Amino acid sequence: MIQVHTCVSVHCDQCDQAVGRLGQARHFRTEHAAITAATAARWRIGPDGLWWCPLCAPALICQAAGHRFTPWCSPQIPGGRPAPSEYRYCRRCCVLEDRPITAQGREGGGPR
């Protein structure tokens, strides 16, 4: 007997990873079930209707909406002297920026 089965799967529009185990797409009977499973697994849908897996979503959200940076931080080096540069990072996607500290204080150049 030949049977035709129709199913739904969700794939990341950035990396093509599917909802399910690595390398194994999960198949759902309905679109509603697929969307429910994807959102429960922390998948996100972008403003343009594209699906993003949990690994790609933070970077793509920052690309679309901007980073959520911490305040600039100037670490201390041994001996209590301030470091020659300061840094900050995005709380969402972990991108790191640094800049030199000039003689005027926190007036370094732009991000590198």
Image: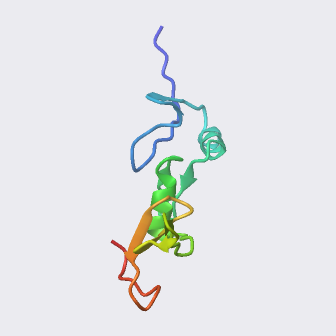
Q: Name which residue lies at 42% across and 87% down.
A: 107
Residue 95: name its quadrant. bottom left
Q: Position of residue 99 (x, y in %)?
A: 39, 75
Q: Is residue 38 above or below residue 2?
A: below
Q: Position of residue 80 (x, y in %)?
A: 52, 70
- Would you say 97 lies left or right of 70 here? left
Which residue reaches farthest left? 112
Q: Is residue 60 above or below residue 6?
A: below
Which residue reaches farthest top? 1
Task: Please count the marks in the image.
Answer: 0
- Can residue 66 be seen from the camera position used here? no
Q: Name which residue lies at 56% across and 75% down.
A: 71
For the C terminus, the quadrant is bottom left
- Can residue 21 be seen from the camera position used here? yes
Which residue reaches farthest front? 79
Toward the viewer: 50 or 5? 50
